[in-house]
Image (tube, helix red, strand yellow):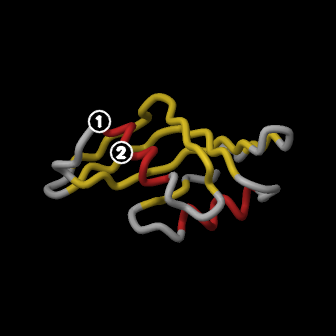
Amino acid sequence: MTLTNDTETNQTTMTVTVRVPNGTDGDLLTDAERRLSRADGVSGVTAGEIKQLQPGLSATDVTVEVTIETTGTQSPRSVVESLEALTGIEVNVQ
């Protein structure tokens, strides 16, 4: 998926894979949103439909399309770098 950016609302849409530990509170999408919102400069995350699930012994990898709202005027590349700095997050840029 190509990164897109709406500069008026500071939103970037991308596909990410998030490792969600087993036994967490809430559903997979809610936990994925919570984990992504921890990145520097991210003010909000909205997850779309789940693209792929990879269950594991201690965690499930959830691939989902998300819209990331940012503070300031971050470029899509800087948003990707902030997300990839988090453990268990992989941005799927094509």
Q: Are marks 1 and 2 in contact (CB under 8 Å)?
A: yes
In the depicted view, which residue is nearer to us: 94 or 80?
A: 80
Say above or below: 21 vs 87: above
Q: Position of residue 58 (x, y in %)?
A: 17, 58
For label 2, the residue is: 31
Residue at position x 72%, y 42% in the image? 11
Q: In this image, 25 relative to 84: left or right?
A: left
Say above or below: 46 vs 60: above
- Amino acid carrying label 2: it is Asp
Q: Position of residue 32 (x, y in %)?
A: 40, 46
Which numbered circle lies on residue 58?
none
Q: Position of residue 54 (x, y in %)?
A: 28, 46
Q: In this image, 24 relative to 35: left or right?
A: left
Quarter of the image for residue 41 reads bottom right
For label 1, the residue is: 27
In the depicted view, which residue is nearer to us: 11 or 49?
A: 11
Quarter of the image for residue 2 reads top right
Q: CA distance from mark 1 to mark 2?
A: 6 Å
- Amino acid carrying label 1: it is Asp
Q: Position of residue 36 (x, y in %)?
A: 49, 53
Q: Secondary structure at mark 1?
A: loop
Residue at position x 66%, y 41% in the image? 13
Say above or below: 50 vs 93: above
Say above or below: 83 vs 43: below
